[in-house]
Amino acid sequence: MIVFISESNLNIVFMKNFNNYTKIEDFLFDPEFNQLINKGGKDDIHFLFEKYPDKKELINSASILLLHLNVKDIEFYEDYIDKKYKELQNRIKSKKRRFILIRWSAAACLLAMIMSIFFLSQPGERSIENTLFTLMDSTSLNVESIRLSTSDIHVKVDENKEIVQTPTGDILIGNEEKIESSKMEDEYIQLIVPNGKRTSISFSDGTIARVNSGSKLIYPRKFKDNKREIYVDGEIYIAVAKEKDKKFLVRTKNITVAVLGTKFNVSAYNNDNIHSIVLVEGAVEVSTDNYKSKIAPNQAFFQEDGKASIKEVDTYKYICWKDGIIKLDNEPLDAIFKKIARYYNISIQQNNQDFDMSKEIYRGKLDLNDSLQEVLDNLAHSSNFTYKVYGKIVCIE
């Protein structure tokens, strides 16, 4: 493979050693990495992917941030950054402080803080949208519990407790915990639902969203007067409360869904090839950069490799996850395993390369309220594979 590297960045790529970098801020505040990303091209980044395959996710996240941010601009907010650092320092009771520009021990707090600064310097709806998706891209799902986060508030949420946003912007978690809107500095709140967890959130307008495993959702502390808008990476089932002349917008990276009141499912995981909008009732308008159409109940919009299509579907197949069910209708085993891995927070590895999972087709249903072993046994009995479980890793033999 031939990689073209711009002459100005040739020495950086070959001479800089990133082997000891283990956190996103290591890359984010490295001057040479900044120069490479801001003055280089995609080929330079791909070269780094090949040279440091174990750090691909860190490099990718840092690159996304730097392509949307000008780090020099952040220097103008040094007093603000210093204030934020001191607030964090007081909360965690730590006396350690390390600098390049400024360095935090918690990458998630760092990224959230940078995003709040970026909002100040990047007005405009499109800029905010891009920034929110950049924030989601940079937020790890590798956490043990559901979390609600802003730059200054981080709360763990029990899976069995509903999250409720009041009309004044306060957040209630079950009947025990309350976060007052007046104590939040940011306009946006991020909900992180790791693999193996699910939750639900009731917004201030009465709209209810069920959020599936491995999903991230960003929503405003208070909806604007003329529209309601949320941002999704993952899967949600949403019942939108009707408000005349006030659209509800669900935005994913490539698709926007506009409704006044309806029930539908959005599946738009960034690492999935197929994204879908499935309408249960009402009407929605789906749009991408080069496509716009309305879909009717029992129809679904699909986007695969940039191509859009609308089909008649069995809607329950797409929304049964909220009931702990996977309905199988000519579903290949590799696609089933991907869903199971998210639901049970496991990794599934294939040791038998002669076994083509894409050709193993299933019909029926799986009850995800069963144990992982029961689910795997049901699949194994219907196909020609065995498996072994090593902690959170399942090996297909």
Image (tube, rainbow, N blue to C red):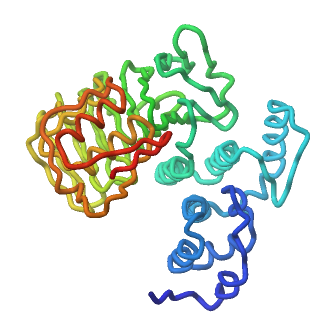
Name the side, left or right, on which 268 lies relative to 158. Answer: left
Give the answer, above or below, for where 44 lies relative to 315.
Answer: below
Residue pushed farthest left? Answer: 312
Residue located 79% across and 36% down the image: 88
Q: Pick the residue in front: 269 or 68.
A: 269
Q: Which of 82 and 145 is in front in this view?
A: 145
Q: Where is residue 62 in the image (x, y as percent from the top left)?
A: 61, 61
Identify the residue at image location x=62%, y=63%.
66
Nearest the camera: 16 or 258? 16
- Toward the right, the furthest residue is 95
The spot of residue 379 in percent (x, y) is: 23, 39
Q: Which residue is drawn at 35% across and 54% down?
A: 254
Figure disc tally: 0
User: Quadrant location of the N terminus?
Assistant: bottom left
x, y (%) of residue 86? 85, 38
Give the side of residue 235 with respect to residue 281, left or right.
Answer: right
